[in-house]
């Protein structure tokens, strides 16, 4: 073998060694790629198996692959789902919307997940949140869908919405001016009753102003101290107290306020009632009570005087009858001549006239300023006659009787007193 042949063989050996090394490197690369693919496949399988999200692949409008999460929230087995139409579980009322949303997401015009309802194998309605994307599966165009069961969240949202509507209704119809006050004293929520009391609208105050701007300046330091103490310990500040506000027209109004810190926050609820009119009526009632007490005192004096006068009159009448009437009646009863009987009768009549004449003088002394007609009217009023009845007896008009009533009250000093005229006359002997 020549040197040339040896050199050719050596070159071939070197070439073969290089090719072998390259093949080994390619094999190692393929091995690593296969390992990566295997790991990716394992990860993908693990994701499909363990994910909290339901994954599925649709091809040709039917299910080709689903993971266990889809099985969990639909109630169907994988075998019952694979090969079925893509919308066989979708609620009939939502099918058109689902088709529209999925096409828009695949086309790129819809970016956010969309919600819809499904009917499970157990005929339960559940809410699903879904996104879809275009993929290739087994060499053909397909859709990868991922979905979450959000039924619990939807129920919670509905409950929260109902609760919010309930509390907002209570807040608006509580009958008192109610506000929610933030830690920085801002009025974050105001009801319509508060608007009526203050005259300010929600748009002017909600989230923009503090209650400090409403308070009468002399009450402000006290209320600011309550606000500070309430956030240290709710028990340090009184729950109910009074203060004054200045409404939109500059009127000072008295308020009765009830306050409560919202648990877990530094906000508090404040409800107010306008007691301005109540306090004014309270003052009027106090004055009327005092006047009534004075009137009661006067009536007690009058009643006591009436009792004394009645007792005096009874004693006078009894004494007169005993001394001036009964002796002559006794003689008259024993008989005698007609002439003597006439004398006794005349004496009895004369003595009775004298007795009642003294009584009349006593009445006249009490009513000496009254005219004869006014005394008649007074007696008729005392007996319970009304103006029309008195007018009929005296043959005068009702307006004339009203004039007599006015004159009697004036002469008796009753014009400026809230005293019933008949009650007053009945109190007299």
Image (tube, rainbow, N blue to C red):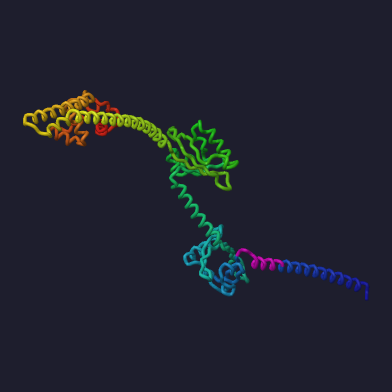
Image side of residue 122 versus residue 12, left or right: left
Where residue 343 appears, x then y in whole percent? 9, 28
Q: Nearer the viewer, residue 241 or 115?
A: 241
Seen in the image, is 410 located left or right of residue 240?
left
Quadrant location, the C terminus: top left
Q: Picture coordinates of residue 272 (x, y %)?
A: 47, 41
Residue 318 % position (x, y)? 22, 31
Q: Which residues are magenta?
A: 39-53
Q: Is residue 196 above or below residue 339?
A: below
The quarter of the rendered structure image containing the N terminus is bottom right
Picture residue at 44% right of the left edge, 35% below the top: 253
| Relative image position of residue 61 (x, y in whole percent) | 54, 70
From the viewer's side, name the closer residue of 119 and 93. 119
Q: Is residue 46 magenta?
A: yes
* Residue drawn where x is 73% and y is 66% of the image: 36
The quadrant where residue 12 appears:
bottom right
Q: Main secondary structure of the magenta part?
A: helix
Is 229 magenta? The answer is no
The quarter holding residue 64 reads bottom right
């Amino acid at each position: 073998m020549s040197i040339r042949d040896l050199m050719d063989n050596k070159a071939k050996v070197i070439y073969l060694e290089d090719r072998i090394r390259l093949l080994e490197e390619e094999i190692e690369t393929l091995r690593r790629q296969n390992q990566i693919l295997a790991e990716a496949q394992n990860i993908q399988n693990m994701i499909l198996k363990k994910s909290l999200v339901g994954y599925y692949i649709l091809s040709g409008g039917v299910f080709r692959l689903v993971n266990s999460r889809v099985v969990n929230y639909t109630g169907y087995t994988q075998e019952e789902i694979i090969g079925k139409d893509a919308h066989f579980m979708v609620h009939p009322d939502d099918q058109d919307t689902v088709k529209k949303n999925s096409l828009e997401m695949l086309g790129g015009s819809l970016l956010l997940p969309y919600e819809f309802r499904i009917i499970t194998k157990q005929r339960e309605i559940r809410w699903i949140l879904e996104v879809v994307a275009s993929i290739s599966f087994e060499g053909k165009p397909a859709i990868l869908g991922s979905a979450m069961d959000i039924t619990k969240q939807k129920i919670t949202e509905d409950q929260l919405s109902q609760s919010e509507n309930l509390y907002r209704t209570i807040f608006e119809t509580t009958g008192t001016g109610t506000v929610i006050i933030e830690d920085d004293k801002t009025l974050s929520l105001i009801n319509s009753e508060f608007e009526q009391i203050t005259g300010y609208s929600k748009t002017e105050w909600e989230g923009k102003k503090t209650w400090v701007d409403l308070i009468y300046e002399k009450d402000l330091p006290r209320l600011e101290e309550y606000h500070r103490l309430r956030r240290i310990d709710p028990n340090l500040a009184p729950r109910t107290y009074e203060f004054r506000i200045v409404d939109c027209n500059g009127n000072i109004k008295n308020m009765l306020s009830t306050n409560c810190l919202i648990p877990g926050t530094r906000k508090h609820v404040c409800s107010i009632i306008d007691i301005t009119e109540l306090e004014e009526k309270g003052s009027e009632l106090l004055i009327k009570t005092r006047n009534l007490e004075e009137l009661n005192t006067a009536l007690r004096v009058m009643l006591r005087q009436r009792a004394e006068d009645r007792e005096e009159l009874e004693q006078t009448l009894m004494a007169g009858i005993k001394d001036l009437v009964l002796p002559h009646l006794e003689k008259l009863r024993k008989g005698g001549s007609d002439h003597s009987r006439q004398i006794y009768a005349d004496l009895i009549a004369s003595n009775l006239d004298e007795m009642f004449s003294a009584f009349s003088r006593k009445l006249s002394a009490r009513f000496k300023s009254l005219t004869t007609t006014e005394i008649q009217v007074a007696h008729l009023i005392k007996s319970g006659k009304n103006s029309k009845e008195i007018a009929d007896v005296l043959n005068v008009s009702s307006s004339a009787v009203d004039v007599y009533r006015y004159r009697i009250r004036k002469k008796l000093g009753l014009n400026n007193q809230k005293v019933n005229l008949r009650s007053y006359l009945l109190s007299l002997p």
